[in-house]
Image (tube, helix red, strand yellow):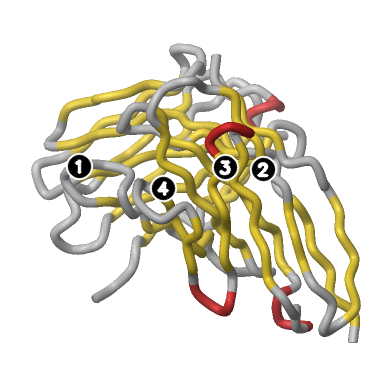
């Protein structure tokens, strides 16, 4: 089985712009979660989707949003980028019940200048 | 709010030394516990997990962890480390079978030949 794929792998944006990141889960997985990884804050949960519904959301501002499509692929969007949004954004896919086993993708490294 | 603490931020060991990485969490309800590893340049991978039953769980590559409920701890151990164990190790907690993983800040392990 192919693993979790994330595109793009690297991205450079400037402050004020918006960005969309994509995640394709492992075939058959319907849960997709997003995490932000930074040196200072570590790994922080952004949100989780299952069957196109957001089931849980972390403590991030409304500039961070996401969605899931009927084929389980997910996108996250960050609007009005700030320097502090520079991070590695990780996507994880899992089975219907969520966190029993999550498989992480390679991440998208976002640099905001 | 629940939190996960990893006491050792950086650990340096010689090959064949024994390893123990500490992890404590603050949450009084039902928890699922995980250790993930991130090798240089690679994805986050699941090392082992605890949901219920035997509090001593065995994972991949000779790692094991012990859940001590009274101490809110889930320490990771390996009797004899190898150079290839050089990586970042993350403890994570999922509370009440929710849909988010709460990660510790990670421990960077360097194994010297």
**Percent coordinates x, y for residue B13 in the rendering:** 89, 71
Badges 3 and 2, same chain = yes
Say whether residue B62 is left or right of residue A73.
Answer: right
Give the SS element for disc 3: strand
Give the SS element for disc 1: loop
Q: CA distance from mark 4 to mark 1?
A: 17 Å
| Residue where numbered disc 3 is placed | B68
| Residue where numbered disc 2 is placed | B23
Chain of the residue under the numbered disc 2 shown in the image: B
| Residue where numbered disc 4 is placed | A91
Residue at image point 12% right, 37% down: A51
- Which numbered disc covers residue A97? 1
- Specify which label sits upstream in the sequence, 3 or 2: 2
**Percent coordinates x, y for residue B23 in the rendering:** 67, 43
Q: Nearer the viewer, residue A5 or A8?
A: A5
Give the SS element for disc 4: strand
């Amino acid at each position: 089985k192919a693993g979790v794929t994330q595109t793009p792998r690297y991205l450079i944006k400037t402050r004020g712009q918006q960005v969309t990141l994509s995640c394709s889960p492992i075939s058959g997985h319907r849960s997709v979660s997003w995490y932000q990884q930074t040196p200072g804050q570590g790994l922080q949960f952004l949100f989780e989707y299952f069957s196109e519904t957001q089931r849980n959301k972390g403590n991030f501002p409304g500039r961070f949003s996401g969605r899931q499509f009927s084929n389980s692929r997910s996108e996250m969007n960050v609007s009005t980028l700030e320097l502090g949004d520079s991070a590695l954004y990780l996507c994880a896919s899992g089975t219907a019940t969520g966190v029993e086993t999550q498989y992480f993708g390679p991440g998208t490294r976002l640099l905001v200048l | 709010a629940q939190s996960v603490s990893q006491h050792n931020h950086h650990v340096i060991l010689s090959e064949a030394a024994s390893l123990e990485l500490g992890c404590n969490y603050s949450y009084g309800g039902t928890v699922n516990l995980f250790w993930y590893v991130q090798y240089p340049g690679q994805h986050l991978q699941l090392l082992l997990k605890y949901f219920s039953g035997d509090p001593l769980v065995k994972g991949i590559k000779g790692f094991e962890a012990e859940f001590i409920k009274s101490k809110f701890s889930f320490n990771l151990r390996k009797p004899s480390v190898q150079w290839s164990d050089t990586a970042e190790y993350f403890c994570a907690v999922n509370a009440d079978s929710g849909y988010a993983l709460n990660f510790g800040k990670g421990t960077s392990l360097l194994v010297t030949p």
